[in-house]
Image (cartoon, rainbow, N blue to C red):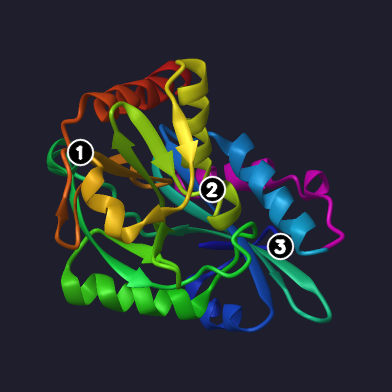
Amino acid sequence: MILLNNQIVQPAEFPESQFKTGLSIYEVIRIFKGHAIFLKDNLLRLRNSIKKSNIDIDIHQLRIEDKLNRLIALEHIEEGNIKYVLHLTKDKWDEYIYQIPHHYPTEENYKNGIDTITCEAIRLNPEVKYINNDLRTLTDRLLQEHRVYEIILKDTEGSVTEGSRSNVFFIKSGILYTAPTSLVLPGTARKRVLDICKAHQIPVIEERIKYSDLKEFESAFITGTSPLVLPIRKIDEFSFDPQNNRLREIMEFYFSLLDKFF
C-alpha cells in the first residue's frame, strides 16, 4: 500500500511515471527490527534539500516520523526500505510514502567485496536529493547489462565522485580519501562514516580523486542505505583488497552502532 498525503491508496492507483514531471525530493529510509534507523540524518538532509530548492515547507509540520511509523505498522515491516517522496508541481505538492524493493548485500559480498564499473555522468545540484530519471535509467541499464553491484560515476574532468546509489571511499596507508562534499550527494551513511572517523581519530582527506590514480589505493568501499559499508573488489580493471585492516575497522565501528541502538 501507499500513503498519499497520509491516506491509504493501492499500488495500482500509483504510477511512478508521474515523478517525471515537476520536482520530486526524496529519502530512502532503512527499517531494521521494525524501526526507522538513523532517521534524524534523513530528515536533516530532507530539510536541506527543501531549503536548497527554495521551497517554503517546514518539515516539522509534516510529522514524517509519525507517518512512517503508521506505514510500518500497517505493513508489519520488520526489515526493508521505505521511500518518502515530496512531489512538487506548479500548483501543489503531495507526499508519498511506500515500501520499495531492497537488495541487501550477501555475507559473501561483505567478505569478498563487490564488482563495479564506471560511467561518465554528473549529478546536477548534488546537494539536493531528487529523482533524476535520466541518470537512473542509464545506471539501471548498465547494472543489468554488466551484472555488477554498483556504477561508479566519473565527472567530465576524469575524477571519481560517487556511486549511482552510494558514496565511495578509498584507503591508502590507513588514510581515507573521498570526494569533497560539495561534489556529491551527502549520503547519510557517508556522514556516519565521517563521524566515526572523527570520533576515533581516523584521518580523512576530501579531495578530487582522478580515475587514473585509482591504482595507488589499497582498498575501496561504498556506503549507502542498503549496503551500509560494503567493500569493493573491482572498479573496472582496478582491484582492491576487501580485507584491508582499516576498512574492517570502519565496518566494525559502523555495525556496532546498529547493535547498540537497535
Query: What is the x, y in percent for residue 73?
Result: 53, 42
Alpha-carbon neighbours of circle 1 within 10 Å: few (<14), some, or many (≥20)? some
Please state which of the two labelled residues, at mark 2 or mark 1, is closer to the viewer.
Answer: 2
Q: Secondary structure at mark 1?
A: helix
Disc 3 residue type (three-letter): Asn
Disc with the residue nearer the chain's start (2 vs 3): 3
Residue 109 location (% of width, % of height): 17, 44
Q: Amino acid at mark 1?
A: Tyr
**In the rendered image of this protein, does residue 25 appear above or below residue 259?**
below
Residue marked by disc 3:
5
Residue 4 position, x and y percent, is: 65, 65
Q: Which tag, 3 or 1, sits closer to the chain's start?
A: 3
Instruction: Mark 2 vs mark 3: give the one in front.
Output: 2
**What SS does tag 3 mark?**
loop
**What is the distance, in whole Å, between disc 2 and disc 3 at their CAs?**
36 Å
User: Circle 1 is placed at which residue position?
Assistant: 110
Q: How far is the residue under mark 3 from the one under mark 1?
A: 38 Å
Between residue 118 and residue 139, name the one nearer to us: 118
10 Å neighbourhood of mark 3: few (<14), some, or many (≥20)?
Answer: some
What residue is rendered at 51% in x and 17% in y?
A: 199
Residue at the image position 53 percent from the left and 55 percent from the top: 184
Query: Which stretch is magenta?
Result: 55-76
Task: Examine the rendered structure and indicate whether residue 122 appears above or below residue 241.
Answer: below
Mark 2 residue crowding within 10 angstroms, few (<14) / some (14–19) / many (20+): some
Q: Which residue is mark 2?
A: 180
Q: Contact, CB < 8 Å: mark 3 with mark 1?
A: no
